[in-house]
Amino acid sequence: MSAEFWVTTIVLTATPGTGALFAIAAGLAGGARAGVVAAFGCTLGIVPHLALALTGAAAVLAASAVAFEAVKWAGVAYLVYMAWGAWRHTGVLAPGDSTARSGRASTEWKVIGTAVLVNLLNPKLTVFFFVFLPMFVDPSADGAVLQMTALGAAIMAITMLIFSIYAVGAAWLRRHVVGRPTVMRWVGRVFALSFVVLALMLALTRH
């Protein structure tokens, strides 16, 4: 793997987006564990996009305006739904105060499911892998699929690491906002606005 691949991947992953914002919100509301779980969910959400790129199905999405628009608007709707939850503190920003093991496990699975959907409903990720991976591997070369799979795994590892750092950082700040209703209300509004902005950006994405 070239230095160009590592630098480009780290820069692109570290640039705040929907997944990073979700991990930060989870860490802020539920602590470091919840944030890392969210980071894992976002990383897991990369798998379908990588699979589509490796099988060539991404070419269909890239070429089909109807398919692209369908996934895009589903993603927009889900981001608006997340914004509403953040505003009302019923979504990822809901207080993570459950200490029961069964209750915590249920909450973590819910966070993972939400995180996977955050990435799954973003058609730009599929197109990104379809365009990005061939920049570093010749698709016609022997073993190209294995090489691109290795690159995809590296991208997932970087995503998990960076998103976890964001989440743990947010968890560290958590002590300054939890228990302060006014602060938490404004935090919820900021995240809600951020999700709306991301939804608008996705909506304006052209095929």
Image: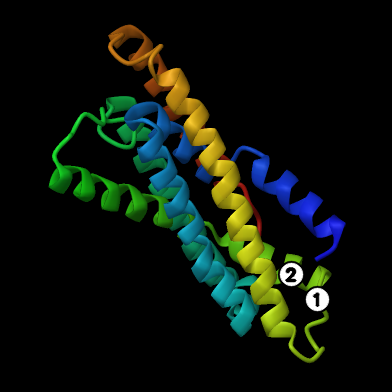
| Residue at image coords 41%, 11% | 176
Return the x and y of residue 118 as percentages of the image width and height. Answer: 45, 51
Quadrant in which the C terminus appears = bottom right
Q: Quadrant of residue 62?
A: bottom right
Q: Count the numbered circles shown.
A: 2
Question: Dot 1: few (<14), some (14–19), or many (≥20) neighbours within 10 Å?
Answer: some
- Judging depth in this view, the residue of 91 and 35 nearest the camera is 35
- Judging depth in this view, the residue of 173 and 62 nearest the camera is 173
The span from disc 1 to disc 2 (Cα, nearest Å) is: 6 Å
Q: Which residue is mark 2?
A: 133
Return the x and y of residue 96 as percentages of the image width and height. Answer: 26, 31
Residue 85 seen anywhere in this rendered image of the structure: yes
Residue 63 seen anywhere in this rendered image of the structure: no
Question: Which three-letter amino acid code belongs to the residue tagged 2?
Answer: Leu
| Residue at image coords 83%, 81% | 138
- Judging depth in this view, the residue of 66 and 32 nearest the camera is 32
Quadrant in which the N terminus appears = bottom right
Question: Which three-letter amino acid code belongs to the residue tagged 1?
Answer: Val
| Residue at image coords 69%, 68% | 151
Above or below for 74 versus 62? above
Mark 1 touches mark 2? (CB < 8 Å): yes
Above or below for 177 versus 70? above
Q: Which residue is mark 1?
A: 137
| Residue at image coords 31%, 34% | 85
Residue 105, disc: none
Return the x and y of residue 141 as percentages of the image width and height. Answer: 82, 89
Does residue 54 appear left or right of residue 71 in this picture? right
